[in-house]
Image (spheres, rainbow, N blue to C red):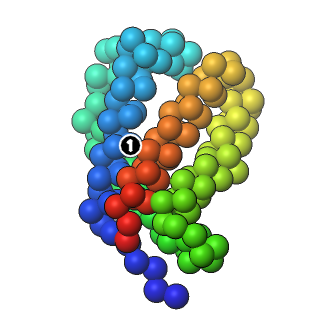
Amino acid sequence: MDVEINWVAVLLAAVVNMVIGGVWYAPKVFGDTWSKIVGLKESDMKQDAAKAMTGAAVLAVVAAYVLAHLSYVSADFFDTSFLSASLSTAFWLWLGVGFTTLLTQGLFERRPLTWTLITAGNLLVALLAMAWVIGGIGY
């Protein structure tokens, strides 16, 4: 099977991921709570911010590409719409890999449940939004 990837959808989904992260971790949304939990001050976050944002952008493209790839395989295997396959793939990746990994990490690092819920919530919303973009645009 040849997997078809729409790079416009992948890049747009990566941008959507970055926008959601920017809003999610804004000080008045979850940013203040999250930064207190992880022990970062605003000055700490400004230091090397460009490096962090560049890395996050590259990783958002990787995540969107993997989601597009797996969504294509899922749509083909289950003979369903690409949008449906993208959304269900995003959810199951979040539940089976993302949420469980974050929860395990939080347990071992002795982080408050609030950290896990903030971080996992961002991941769920970002994955579903990326899936909506990827699935909506198609391959």
Q: What residue is pinned by disc 1?
A: 17
Identified by mark 1, the residue type is: Asn
Whole-percent x and y of residue 50? 25, 36
Q: Which of the 4 quarters of the picture holds residue 23?
A: top left
Whole-percent x and y of residue 35? 47, 17
**Relative depth, front residue between 53 and 125:** 125
- Using the image, determine if residue 122 lies above or below residue 30: below
**Relative depth, front residue between 37 and 28:** 28
Q: Which of the 4 quarters of the picture holds residue 68?
A: bottom left
Determine the residue located farthest toward the bottom in the rendered image: 1
Res. 33 in view: yes
- Using the image, determine if residue 4 lies above or below residue 23: below
Whole-percent x and y of residue 131? 46, 53
Res. 62 in view: no
- Using the image, determine if residue 83 lies above or below residue 21: below
Q: Is 88 left, or right, of 106 in this rendering?
A: left
- The residue that appears at 56% across and 77% down in the rendered structure is 76
Question: Please, what secondary structure does the residue beneath circle 1 have?
Answer: helix
Whole-percent x and y of residue 43? 31, 15
Q: How many marks?
A: 1
Q: Residues within 10 Å of mark 1 (few under 14, many from 20)?
A: many
- The residue that appears at 73% across and 38% down in the rendered structure is 104
Q: Which of the 4 quarters of the picture holds residue 61?
A: bottom left
Q: Which part of the image, by quadrant, shows the C terminus? A: bottom left
**Relative depth, front residue between 81 and 34:** 81
- The residue that appears at 65% across and 53% down in the rendered structure is 92
- Using the image, determine if residue 66 lies above or below residue 54: below
